[in-house]
Amino acid sequence: MSRRIVRTALALVGAAGLAASLAACGSQVATAEVGACSNLEDLSGELTEIPTVDCGEAHDAQFVHSFDIDQDGDFPGDDAIATAAQEGCLSGFESFIGLSYEESTLELDWIAPNESTWDQANDREVLCIAFLTDGSTVTESWEGAAV
């Protein structure tokens, strides 16, 4: 059975133009470390920093992979960014979680460069985030948990 990556209007910005967007502050763009935990409700609006919590505290999301889009020049467009983000995040998901996305109970989304951050801050980083959609929270990391 094939699963499709769920896009949530509460959370993240990929190329679909969801509720959150990264803001370039000078030449800086918000980022998070792989393994950092967060809450979806904190990842909406214009983000100048990405709020994280200790993974021992209640949370419903975790950054599972990050990578740079290897492309210079003009912003390639939302569709190209979404394709690159989906491919990169799917490949990083299994390495972090210990289970393929198709077998996992978690959903997957990403925060990716938008035209503004691409042009103003030379942003090429994609942050991949796994999350729960049932309203529950956990107090542990999903790294290697095969969930």
Image: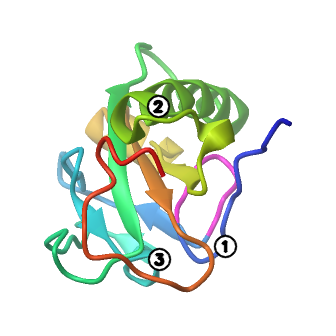
Q: CA distance from mark 3 to mark 2?
A: 26 Å
* Mark 2 burial class by Cα count in 10 Å: few <14, some 14-19, many 20+: many
Identify residue for label 3.
Answer: 44
Q: Is residue 2 left or right of residue 131?
A: right
Residue located 33% across and 77% down the image? 59
Q: Residues within 10 Å of mark 3 (few under 14, many from 20)?
A: some
Type of the residue with mark 2: Glu
**In the picture provided, is 26 more to the left or to the right than 96?**
left
Q: Is residue 119 left or right of residue 121?
A: right
The secondary element bearing badge 1 is classed as loop
SS class, disc 2: helix
Q: What residue is at 43 percent from the left and 22 percent from the top? A: 69
Q: Residue 2: percent from the left, percent from the top?
A: 83, 36
How far apart are the two marked residues, 1 and 2, measured between alpha carbons?
24 Å
Q: At which x and y percent is residue 71? A: 44, 14
For residue 18, say whether it is visible.
yes
Report which residue position mark 2 lands on.
Answer: 94
Can you tell which of label 3 and label 2 is closer to the viewer? 2
Q: Give the residue type that dot 1 points to.
A: Ala
Q: Secondary structure at mark 3?
A: loop
Q: Is the stretch drawn in magenta largely helix, strand or loop?
A: loop
Quarter containing the N terminus = top right
Magenta segment range? 12-18
Is there CB contact under 8 Å for labels 3 and 2? no
Image position, residue 117 (x, y; %): 38, 46
Above or below 125: residue 31:
below
For residue 70, above or below residue 28 = above
Residue that label 1 marks: 9
Residue at 34% across, 69% down = 47
Between 124 and 97, which is closer to the camera in this rendering? Answer: 97
For the residues bearing labels 1 and 2, Cβ distance under 8 angstroms: no
